[in-house]
Image (cartoon, rainbow, N blue to C red):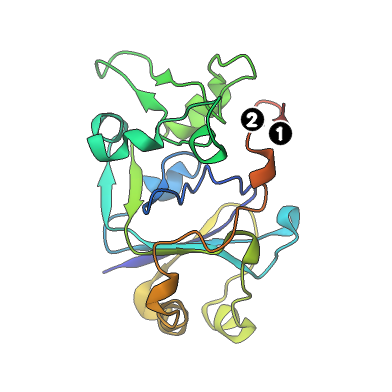
Amino acid sequence: MAKVYMYVVARDFGFAPNPFHGVCTLATCKPKIRGPAKPGDWVVGMGGQQLDATGRCVYFMKVTDKMTFNEYWNAPQFKGKRPVRNGSRKVMLGDNIYHRDDDNDPWTQEDSHHSKPDGSPEWWNVETDTGADSVLISTRFVYFGSSAPEIPKGILTEIGYENRRSHRTFYDWQCGALIAWMGSFPTSHWNLVLSDPFQFAQSGARYSRERNAIVA
């Protein structure tokens, strides 16, 4: 039975999720979603107070594939999601950042939004991100970014959703109205970035989990 995972997107740079290159990926943060979620499940990212977007939908995606970090790193079709920190905003925010040669080796974290300003690993981020060796992949998504629309309050009330820490998990049969709302968007909206991420202009910044802060 398919599930629907809903959570608050605390930061929206275009890194987690990464909606670029026609594929939406969730490869960092949210290990408690990335671990159990499987193809056929839905992930819904809601805005919150930090983005001044409470009740609005930043993105939704139906999981169509799932890979390990090494599979993601080595997949030719996802090399464009490897970060290049002196490149365009899109490639600066690449989320294909973890790999290792052997299961007993420590993870390599590429220079990325989750690294320290000097490009070295930010081990608090490494620990959280690798808490699930899983990358969620979707070729059926709508990414609204900064134009995030409100989900009708009646739909959220019906399933008992409230913005709060961590995530909520529902069965798809509990979310008929929500799934119908997501399916109501025209095909011209699907698999596209409809607006820039809320914090896209800060694409050169980094996130430090140790400090719980955005750093230059």
Disc number at residue 47? none
Residue found 33% across the figure and 40% down from its top = 134
210 relative to 64 in the view: left or right? right
Q: Earlier in the sequence, mark 1 or mark 2?
A: 2
Query: Residue 122's x, y, as percent?
Result: 57, 20
Q: Can residue 30 be seen from the camera position used here?
A: yes
**Vertical arrangement, residue 145 with respect to residue 105, above or below:** below
State which quadrant residue 88 falls in: top right
For this rendering, which residue is in front, 1 or 121?
A: 121
State which quadrant residue 163 falls in: bottom right
194 relative to 162 in the view: left or right? left
Judge the density around disc 1: few (<14), some (14-19), many (≥20) Cα neighbours within 10 Å: some
Judge the density around disc 2: few (<14), some (14-19), many (≥20) Cα neighbours within 10 Å: many
User: Is there a contact, CB below 8 Å, between mark 1 and mark 2?
Assistant: yes
Q: CA distance from mark 1 to mark 2?
A: 6 Å
User: Looking at the figure, which quarter contains the N terminus?
Assistant: bottom left
Residue found 61% across the figure and 19% down from its top = 116
Query: Residue 140's x, y, as percent?
Result: 34, 64
- The residue singled out by tag 1 in the image is 214
Residue found 35% across the figure and 42% down from its top = 135
Query: Residue 197's x, y, as percent?
Result: 61, 52
**Vertical arrangement, residue 203 with respect to residue 32, above or below:** above
Residue found 25% across the figure and 29% down from its top = 74
Q: Amino acid at mark 2?
A: Arg
Q: Can residue 36 be seen from the camera position used here?
A: no
- The residue singled out by tag 2 in the image is 206
Q: Amino acid at mark 1?
A: Ile
State which quadrant residue 186 falls in: bottom left
